[in-house]
Amino acid sequence: MKLWHETFEHGADIGIRGKGRTLEEAFSNGAKALFALMADLSTIEPQKEIHVECTAPDIETLFMVWLNQLISLADIEKMVLSEFKVTIRNNNLTAVARGESINPQKHDLGVEVKGATFTMLRVFQEAGYFVAQCVVDV
Amino acid sequence: MEIKSLKKINDFLWELPPVGEMRVPGLIFASQKLVEEMDEKVREQITNVACLPGIVHASIAMPDAHWGYGFPIGGVAAFDAEEGGIISAGGVGFDISCGVRTLTTGLTKDEIMPSLERLIDKIFQVVPAGVGSEGKIRLTPAQIDDVLAGGAKWAVDKGYGLPEDLEYIEEGGYVTWADPKQVSDLAKKRQFREVGTLGSGNHYLEIQHVFEIYDAEAAEALGIKKDDILIAIHCGSRALGHQIGTDYLVTLAQASKKYNIPIRERELVCAPINSPEGKRYFGAVGAGINCALANRQVISHLTREAVYEIIPQAKLEMLFDVSHNTCKVEEHVVDGKKRRLYVHRKGSTRAFGPGSPEIPSRFRSIGQPVFIGGTMGTCSFILVGTEFGTEQAFGSACHGAGRSMSRKRATKTWRGDTVIKDLSAKGIIIRTRSYRGVAEEAPGAYKDVVEVVNAAHQAGLAKKVAMVKPLACIKG
């Protein structure tokens, strides 16, 4: 894996994957992979921030819940997000996510994501890096 | 899918005999070619569904079945609550009650062509589409509950459409068993500004012309002739439905453990229909169905206003509205006995045969209309349900062509602006806010809808009535 965030193929839907030196960085990059489906990340300015808190029974479910929180909050605020600062303690996650209001003229919009799923949901370590991935429903 | 392991019943029906933990056989309604093109994952998913408690008759796959979430897309399964039957979010899908509504316009192709571009521009202006789009309707928390309880009837009562529209929607425009209390505040909050929006991905609003009639008698009953102009709206329950899916994945995962349900993969998390969790999810699905029906009703109203402004002599009337991501409670005769079943249709359309009381009286003798959408560059089909399909597949047919190429590969293969130019050369106008979305939905990324529809027709699931072709399309 060369990129820190990437997508992978999965039938009618699409997989997203984040990689990092820490678990937090992998979760943050997973979120980047998610929002890269919705818009061109390089066009998003970090003008506004939202706060996220979530918890789950295990670290893999936490990744899915984290992404679903972002999808919901960004939808309510009509924002696209591009920067994420994540802290994880005992399967509890707190984060600050930054981005701006959606602007079709500016953001090269892609597809709306309906939800992150259990499909190919994995959080693991590989060659000294943390990787977090799952398939999202689009 | 390897054909050798299947038992051939006839040219369009294949059986996966029940082995191991399978409680019922798998049944695939498709041509040999379509079966061979199916992913092996589809076999695995049909098998997994066949192992779920309370499943009745068979785990069924439609001609376009492809790898989905838990159930295959194009999967049908019915469960008996009295026999420990379950309800699963994997059998409904994230976009609850996504579906297709078709309106007649009273116009012919010749009459619309001079105003086509102005017309699609007007509709594009008034029907919000694409990522992050907002509707004109702003709802309060109390009002959203009315939407979820009232469905399309709520919309008509608010002035979005005509009372006679409701007769031509499944369930008369709303399901009575919807329970808005089972929908989270977050799901409701996400919908405050999204009623009357098209969404993105494979959703569309299309102006079509009737290109060919296959069944003159059925076409007459449906009120369509060659060269007639129709408007098709494909969308679902928007963010509210998605959030119900997300919320209940967690609830159902806990329920699967609590009730020791033997599930073969995490995507099939479920709850017994008669458990508190199962009842809550079913009530939430009902609310999602009503949300989708209200949404398509509001979009129809906006479309009507736009069309009447540009072409005052037009008359937009409902042909029918069918959903293709649902779980509904229905009566079916299985082995000679009438049973009350919870029918999951995931990426498959209800297709009741002639005589069903669920069908509007005007075409009850013909069968329920079924819309199978193709791509923005090819064609779509209108069919009607059959007695055979009602008996063998709980009255179900396929809902589309199914992708043949992933979104990722599609965006590497095509550019949105080039796709739009190529379609324009073929006489099809595209309007969109997302070039990337158009590339992902390029006609070449889908299976051949003609083959899928012919298989549904030859398998006897539904009968072909007409082929329609796009003239202009709004992509979300």
Image (cartoon, coloured by chain):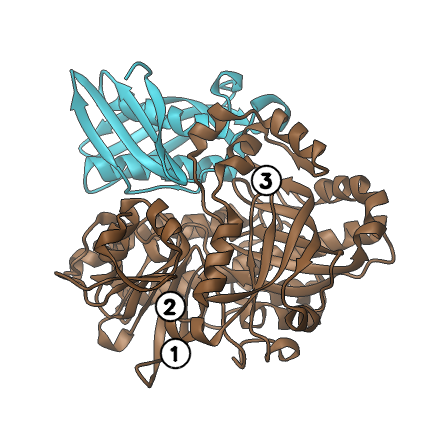
**The chain drawn cyan is chain what?**
A
Provide the chain ID for the residue under circle 2. B
Q: Are marks 1 and 2 on the same chain?
A: yes
Q: Nearer the viewer, residue A55 or B64?
A: B64
Mark 1 in CB contact with mark 2 (< 8 angstroms): yes
**Residue at the (43%, 54%) spot, across then down:** B347
- Residue at (55% x, 38% y) in the render: B443
Q: Position of residue A103 (x, y in %)?
A: 60, 27
Residue B425 x/y as whole percent: 71, 32
Give the chain ID for the brown colour. Answer: B
| Closest to the observer, B272 or B408 | B408
**Crowding at label 1, few (<14), some or many (≥20) Cα neighbours within 10 Å?**
some
Q: Which residue is mark 1?
A: B332
Residue indicated by mark 3: B476
Snapshot quadrant of residue B211: bottom right
Give the number of the mark in front: 1 or 2: 1
Q: Position of residue B94 (x, y in %)?
A: 41, 50
> Does the image show residue B142?
no
Which quadrant of the view contains residue B329? Answer: bottom left
